[in-house]
């Protein structure tokens, strides 16, 4: 079953703009992670945020987590053509390492 | 470099055949996972193994089988009982709880 739901399903922006995508989930979590997938490839881990954290940064990435709303957002600043990919959120529960993935946001950066 | 190797990259299966997808890792990770991805969709968990000689069913295990005889290897067999096997299959591993997964580059399976 899908735990997370990303929004929007697809997003197109001009190079240099910021991209924001959101993830909502249904049950209590231990960690929330974001992954990137280029077309036809495996997933690449971007960032992990724990349930007791509210915000985390990594380079041009900023992730927020609101456990009261069961939602997270991923912000990519100063987007580049190479950021074109699908982005997935994934969650795991306490005592359970299994990751449950959302449906993904397809991001297209227009040069 | 350490990583996960999936082979083959492309695989074609005839109706009624069993096929085995290979997943090998040299990361010394304990836990390994198999996911299935259908076009435009997220990943669904097929099977996972947290230790050698032990594995558990995921959300969509029917028609699939696995083994974990070695820490480095977690092959997935798609049996003839899997009625809709055409999909992209991804293998992943993790060293322990609370970390990010490392994924292989995937195997695209097509029924012909």
Image: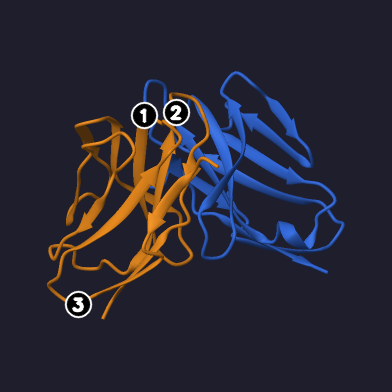
Q: Are marks 1 and 2 in contact (CB under 8 Å)?
A: yes
Q: What residue is pinned by disc 3?
A: B14
**Residue B89, relative to residue A28: is it above or below?**
below
Q: Is mark 3 on a helix, strand or loop?
A: loop
Residue B30 shows which numbered tag?
A: 1
Name the residue located 45 percent from the left edge and 37 percent from the top edge: A26
Coordinates of residue A103 in the picture (x, y in percent): 49, 54
- The image quadrant where one finds the C terminus of chain A is bottom right
Label count reads: 3
Question: Element at badge 1?
Answer: loop
Spatial CA span between label 2 and label 3: 36 Å
Instruction: Using the image, determine if residue A30 lies above or below residue B7.
Output: above
Query: What residue lies at 50% left-to-right and 54% top-to-bottom?
Result: A42
Secondary element under disc 2, as helix, strand or loop, is loop
Chain B takes which shade in the image? orange
- Any idea which chain is the blue one in this picture? A
Displayed quadrant of residue B41: bottom left
- State the residue position of label 2: B95
Residue extending farthest front: B1
Q: Residues within 10 Å of mark 1 (few under 14, many from 20)?
A: some
- Depth check, front residue: A7 or B41: B41
- How far is mark 1 from mark 2, CA to CA? 5 Å
Name the N-terminal-most of marks 2 and 3. Answer: 3
Q: Where is residue A95 in the image (x, y as percent from the top left)?
A: 37, 21
In which image quadrant can residue A62 be found? top right
Asked if labels 2 and 3 share a chain, the reply is yes
């Amino acid at each position: 079953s899908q735990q997370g739901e990303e929004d929007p399903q697809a997003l197109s922006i001009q190079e240099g703009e910021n991209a924001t995508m959101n993830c909502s989930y249904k049950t209590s979590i231990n960690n929330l992670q974001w992954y990137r997938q280029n077309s036809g490839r495996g997933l690449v881990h971007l960032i992990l945020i724990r349930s007791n954290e509210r915000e985390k940064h990594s380079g041009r990435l900023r992730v927020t987590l609101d456990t009261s709303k069961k939602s997270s957002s991923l912000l990519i600043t100063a987007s580049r053509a190479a950021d074109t990919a699908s982005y997935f959120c994934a969650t795991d529960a306490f005592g359970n390492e299994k990751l449950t993935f959302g449906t993904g946001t397809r991001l297209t950066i227009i040069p | 470099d350490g990583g996960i190797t999936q082979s083959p990259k492309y695989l074609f299966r005839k109706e009624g055949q069993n096929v085995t997808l290979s997943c090998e890792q040299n990361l010394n990770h304990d836990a390994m996972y198999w996911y299935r991805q259908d076009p435009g969709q997220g990943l669904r968990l097929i099977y996972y193994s947290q230790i050698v000689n032990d594995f558990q069913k995921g959300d969509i295990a029917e028609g699939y089988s696995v083994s974990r005889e070695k820490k480095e290897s977690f092959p997935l067999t798609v049996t003839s009982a899997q009625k809709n096997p055409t999909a992209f299959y991804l293998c992943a591993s993790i060293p322990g709880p609370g970390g990010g997964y490392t994924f292989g580059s995937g195997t695209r399976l097509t029924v012909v």
